[in-house]
Amino acid sequence: MPGHACVNLTNITTDRDAFMSGKLPTYVTPPSLDAYPFISGKLKFTNHNIALLGDEEPWPDKFEDVGFEHDHFFSPDIIDVDRSSILSRMSDSTFERLFGILKLCLNNFTTITSKADLTALVLRNADLYTDKQIRPDQIEAYQLSDLKTDEHIHWGDLTALYNESNPDQQRVISDYFEHYKNRSLVRLLSVQAPCFNLPVSLDEQFLSKTENGQTFLFSDIQSAWLRDDVFHRQFTIQAVMSDMEYRLVACAPTLTTALAKVTSFVLALDRSSGHIAMRVLLNEKLLAVAKIANTKGNNASQKMIWNLDRIGTDNEFKKISAQEGNLKDTFTDTLLAVEKALGLQWSKVQKLEDELGL
């Protein structure tokens, strides 16, 4: 059946083998752009993720992460050598590239892009560390642990840094994630996003350009060039579970692809899956909601019933419409075209029933 969700299991075991053996691979396969939101969700515990096939090993939850920070970074004097030595082992160029990608900052104001920046931060807070027993490397490690990473990391750039580094620096980069983030970097980079077998008729072409080694694509929605990963997550698809928990299903660059993915996902659902609704967000703002219902007949399955009267009406949402203020028609036309390409008539039948007052 077209549209069935699938998961690419290629290279999923690579991280587990490395994680269990303690050996690091010299090369890691770059993750797909679709996987970036899932990797970010695994880096910082969030409930907006679905379990992926081939990824049965548990990840630390938010309580374990809090315990990890308390046990290792509660105060500078308890920081061990495994953590405090990472900065001295990390070359200046690795530091600048790594934390340039992670975009480390303090309170959204102070950005750390070099070892000199970190030293300056320590000096500004020197009055806080009067205990002579605390070593300078412990203070630097403590400050580093307090810095926050960017919410949307370009995991392709991080993979490139790892692959281009020598074995010593690969170990340092890996140790940073293990000892500061409570995560295996190689395991993070092996996280896969669900893939969808969409009809060729729904393929889309985009304008692209390269600047300073970075790929940008033109967004008709925002009338701007966006970094490739930002472009591909303009739309977010979430499943609403019976306990009202939201789970990340996929991201998409356009309304067509978003509706194709959410429709394919529901097509593949089991009736006992516990999903009660689906949400589509544009730039992290709710655009549309569809409840999940059972179809009739001998081959009963799941279908979506969209609330077309409550499609987003913000000015931002109107940008996806060909005509100002015509968002509902644009959404409906796109939805009907997508369902037709997938061999469905859910919304067409719903539209006719609504018009007939059935």
Image (tube, rainbow, N blue to C red):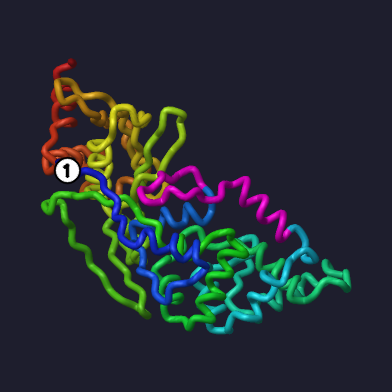
Q: Position of residue 158 (x, y in %)?
A: 45, 71
Compared across the picture, whether 156 is left or right of 332 comes to: right
Residue at (26, 48) in percent of width and height: 6
Task: Between residue 105 and residue 37, name the one nearer to us.
Answer: 37
Q: Quadrant of residue 159?
A: bottom left
Task: Between residue 77 and residue 217, name the one nearer to us.
Answer: 77
Whether residue 154 appears in this view of the structure is yes
Counting labels gives 1
Mark 1, residue position: 338
Whether residue 70 is in magenta: the answer is yes
Give the residue type that dot 1 points to: Val
**Picture layout, residue 31 above or below residue 257:** below
Q: Disc 1 on helix, strand or loop? A: helix
Q: Position of residue 235 (x, y in %)?
A: 34, 50
Task: Between residue 70 and residue 335, name the one nearer to us.
Answer: 70
Residue at (26, 31) in percent of width and height: 304
Q: Which residues are magenta?
A: 46-73
Whether residue 281 is in magenta: the answer is no
Q: Position of residue 269 (x, y in %)?
A: 28, 35
